[in-house]
Amino acid sequence: PSFTESYCWPPIARGCDVVAISYQGNDPFIYIPPVLTFLQLKSCYKALPNKNGPLALILCPGWKKAELVFELLKTYERRSRRLHPILIILGQNKEAAESVKIQGCEIIVTTPCSLLRLFDHHGFLFCRLCHLVLDEIEVLFSDTAEQVFAILDYYKKAPKCEYSPQQIIAVGIHWNKHIARLIKEFMNDPYVVITAMEEASIYGNVQQVVQPCTDSERTAVLLKILDFTDNNVQKVLVFTDSVEEAEMVHKALKSDTVFALKFHKECKFNFKYILEQWTKKRHSGTHVVLVLTDDCMQPLGITDATCVIHFSFPSRRLFGQRLHSMSDNFSNGIKNSSVDQEYRKATSVILLTENSARHAPGILQYLHRAEAEIPPKLHEFTTKTLEAEEDKKFSRPLCAYLKTFGICKKRRVCQNRHRINLQIDVPQNIPDKITRTPGCVTILPLHIVHATNYFGRIVDKEKDQYTILAEEINEYFKKPSNKIAAKNVEKLAFYGLCEKTLFHRVQVLEISAKEEENVFFNVKVKYVDEGRTSQVQSYQLLHLPAMFQCLPPQAVEFIICRVKPIDNETEWNPEVTSYIHHKIKGKLHEAKIVHTLGNTVWVDPMVGIELLPDLKMSINEYSVRSEILATGLGTDNPEHITELQKL
């Protein structure tokens, strides 16, 4: 077991309620081995009613995580008795929920919304349930708190067998305010395991204070903070990031008659004296201040500080370590009934200057979770920092989530840009007459990325130039003498490529490093008239005459508007993508263009058409958006076009 697992596995395997918050809190391995271990003990479940229903239920924050957990269960179940786990992801169609069979299943992996849809048709789901696992608890609570508490209520109210185990396991990366309610109302004397110290400080009710100031004002602000009026004993640590800074701060405190100690790598002879002064019993109204550098935390081993002042701003890892210096004064976040709680309350003070502004988004996020008071200056710093980060992405592709759904939920960590770049976003591969007078066009989807995102061609009904070119290329390469292998393969150059019986125009995107013993090598190519990419061998590339390169690449990206996945998901379920793939690929569609940007066209609606050659007409067969909604896995997204227009 890892460090966190070594604390979590024993109580979970004993059937205890457990909350685990860790940097690795999104790893299902925190709970899978001990849960499987407990499920081997058949004797523990003898008293349960002889009905259908799972023994264990694992709630995940989305279909993708649920699939991962399910695959892990199938892998490790091979080493144990057969538990017949099943993965249940349900849309809004009632028929799908009614058709689910759970006979003999002992573990269900699902999402909160899917489970509630299932429960509407299978009311006995909780009658045998002994183990309820909440995976990525902070995500579950931030996205589906109402649904999670509804499930917890059902679990709590379900008839319980006196001798059967009852266990709730919650794991995650961050503490969430709803976890306190989870522990108080639904758990029985749980083990709370927190290996991320900054998260432990939220649980321990550490008061977080942000003091905005300029870099030159820090010393004056520090002296003001240390102007104690409290009669309680205060033990304060002032953290600096260098020996020079520590010396400067210590000198300023002494000159202001503050009793202060200092400790850094150049004054190791003071070690014993520092510890004696720090641990010395003090009378009410006396205080001790220690100025130190981060590398001295471990040797000193201080855990009873009442206040930590971040004179220099730390990294996330150092921030947690600094807060650990107050761990003796962390209150019990749940059993917070001690009379002297206020006396023991720990405080963390952050001096936020223009030099630490780059940390502002992270601080803001943390303070929101700590429910701390947030100064307006922090919002200002955050806005400026995010704008600066966005400026650095200006040459990156436009964010796919922004294009597909109108918003990007992970904007801060997303590597792509979220603004228009007029140099990149000028229309490409889109006929001039369409950009001048956008309206209805005929499109041919050839590469399906997901349910609402495709690559293909805009087809000219009167005279389609690509159809003519494709015929000429295939006619040309039919002659064996014209199939000339490319000698020097170059990046971004165009070549011919035979796939089955058809020849395509491709562009080289990447060339793998050549191995000395191999004459041939892998090449990543893009089919410029279809939009898909592929790995091929260099010897497969054919010389493409210039006359076949005159017509610009024809592949265009199409996005269906006003529809998104259900349940706040950010990615389409493979089931709906597969359905749409078989429905539309290679078939002509009529579509109305709403927006064009770069090589992307937004369409609403997009309608499948059936040609009736005898009558010289076509009929509308289906609307792609309506087909997606009919699967029950998609829902209306009315803000999509509005958000695009704002962009």
Image (cartoon, rainbow, N blue to C red):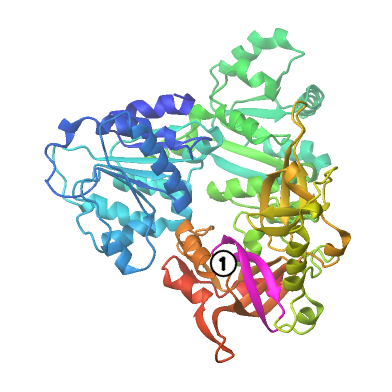
**Residue 325 is drawn in which quadrant?**
top right
Q: Identify the residue at horizontal 82%, vertical 68% (top origin).
A: 551
Taking the image as drawn, is residue 338 in sight?
Answer: no
- In this picture, residue 78 sits left or right of residue 560: left
- In this picture, residue 639 sits left or right of residue 565: right
Q: Looking at this rendering, what residue extends furthest in the bottom direction?
A: 615
- Asked which secondary structure carries label 1, the reply is loop
Residue 143, percent across and down?
Answer: 47, 57
Residue 311 lies in the magenta-colored region: no
Quadrant of the snapshot with the N terminus:
top left
Choose between 563 and 237: the one closer to the eye.
Answer: 563
Under mark 1, the amino acid is Lys
Choose between 345 and 27: the one closer to the eye.
Answer: 27
Residue 320, percent across and down?
Answer: 59, 32
The residue under label 1 is 585
Residue 174, percent across and down?
Answer: 51, 42
Task: Tell me which segment is drawn in magenta.
Answer: 439-460
Residue 284, percent across and down?
Answer: 54, 27
Choose between 312 and 309: the one closer to the eye.
Answer: 312
- Is residue 361 positioned above or below 201 on the image? below
Q: Identify the residue at horizontal 75%, vertical 12% (top origin).
A: 267
